[in-house]
Amino acid sequence: MSIPPAATSSVSFSQGVNLMADRALALLNLADGLAETIKACNSVLQLNFPVKMDDGNYRVFQGWRAVHSDHRLPVKGGIRFAPHVNQDEVIALASLMTYKCAIVNVPYGGSKGGLIVDPKTHSVGEMERITRAFARHLIDKGYISPGGNVPAPDMGTGQREMSWIADTYKKLHPHDINYFGCVTGKPPTNGGIRGRVEATGRGLQYAIHEFFRHPKDIALAGFDSGLAGKRVIVQGLGNVGYHVAKFLQNEDDARITVIIEWDGALHDEKGLDVEAVKQHITEHGGVKGYGAGAYIADGKSALEIDCDILVPAALEAQITIHNVDRIKAPLIVEGANGPVTYEADERLRARGTVVLPDAYANAGGVTVSYFEWIKNLSHIRFGRMGRRFDEYRGQVVIDALEEMVGKEVPAHLRDKLTQGADELRLVRSGLDDTMRLAYQEISEAFHTNDQVNDFRTAAFFVSLKKVATTYMEMGV
Ligand code: NAD
């Protein structure tokens, strides 16, 4: 059953995204009707299809794929499997994809898919038949293809589902040599790219790194030191939340003080062991019963615990008019899509809480999906042609240095100089560059425009300007 929007907000998810976009559109001085053209969702396909269950009976499943804007092709966006998906949510998420791709300069339009299903209640065999049936109908109606519409994982889906979708497409189009490009987020052993699974969490980490390189922005959050030692709350230890929590803890010495899951929260000011908590969730299905830290049964209330950085990485509408005034984090980094409702966002803006918005902060996934799609269309792994050559060149430099100065190059420098870039390094480098440049564009829009006083409006401003330019140049 869908959660009615009124429970968390007076406007629906898609209306909320449009209202957030309106703040930036008001500053862009576009031709009459262009703003409405950009905001409108181009098409939504609703499907009701039967699947045979393990017990021999049939069940009808309902799902959607929305294409928000095809000003660039293909359109791109994940497929979500969850018991509460609804059409408005899919439309909202598709529009966020349009804006997100423009922010990080990924040349795609925006799309999204959702299917009402609880993967926890089905066998692997049933999930495969459900996924393949959904994919078959979407392919049949032109809503999946390498040049037209390319899904990816989202909540409740991952490499396994993307593999099934790619195989379904291949069977229907056996002569399309680009069939692998019909979906991203596949396993590296089956057309995927290294670094895609971690990409959204990694992108969040790079976004936070870039934030901490900007003294003016650090000051806005009231911080007087860097990322090390910062207290972080992460909501949702799934794909996005787990990776960002792990990287911040292991690589940046941040303290993950609170982890919130569907069955409650864990709190330990000394810091929780992310890997151990993840292991507990894998074994027991939730955080309850974990041996360290305090357990809080009302997980959502833990969003209000004092911290430095709050990373909502589970569901939409988690910070609402009902709890926003009790949220203490001076910096919110949106791992999930739409975790802050429109009204709550207005309050956060008014009181100056820094929010790195979803359309920027969680764009690491679509960025690496773009790399995967390029790999699929070029039919070659990144680094395959140049890696050994780079290593050889490094060795030549070492030989030349040693000959000239008569001393050996130290081992740690020798290793660095003779290391050619493999696929994972190149993916991380491309992602880091993307997140840095996008941050710089957003931060500049923020600091150079008197009428922009928050990062979300700045991000929309940057994005909508690009989308509007494309519309005007190509002609509507
Ligand atoms: P996921 O299914 O891997 O993880 C979601 C996690 O949230 C799970 O651990 C789940 O148990 C937990 N959860 C469910 N209900 C909860 C609740 N009430 N309170 C706390 N935790 C709860 O999904 P994901 O792929 O990590 O996606 C999470 C969010 O990030 C979604 O909003 C999604 O749209 C967004 N996102 C995902 C990607 C991606 O690459 N996967 C990219 C961009 C944005």
Image: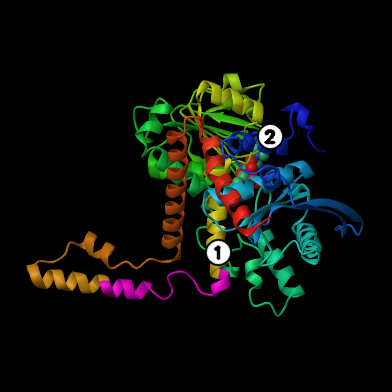
Q: Quadrant of residue 339?
A: top right
Q: Residues within 10 Å of mark 1 (few under 14, many from 20)?
A: many
Q: Residue furthest left?
A: 406
- Residue at image position (21%, 62%) is 411
- Is label 1 within 8 A of ligand 1 (CB to nearest ligand atom)? no
Which one is nearer the viewer's eye here, 373 or 381? 373
- Residue at image position (46%, 52%) is 434
Q: Quadrant of residue 58?
A: bottom right
Q: Quadrant of the N terminus?
A: top right
Label disc, if present, on residue 16 of the rendered structure: 2
Report helix, strand or loop for mark 2: helix
Q: Which residues are magenta?
A: 376-393
Q: Is residue 426 visible?
A: yes
Amino acid under label 2? Gly
Label disc, if present, on residue 242 of the rendered structure: none
**In the picture shown, does residue 79 fall above or below 18?**
below
How far separated are the C-alphas under marks 1 and 2? 31 Å
Q: Is residue 278 visible?
A: no
Residue 280 coordinates in the image, percent (x, y): 58, 42
Residue 83 coordinates in the image, percent (x, y): 77, 43
Residue 326 coordinates in the image, percent (x, y): 58, 19
Does the stretch in magenta take in 391?
yes
**In the picture shown, does residue 442 fall above or below 370?**
above
Label disc, if present, on residue 372 of the rendered structure: 1
Residue 108 coordinates in the image, percent (x, y): 60, 57
Left or right, residue 394 beside residue 40: left
Left or right, residue 375 beside residue 78: left
Report helix, strand or loop for mark 1: helix
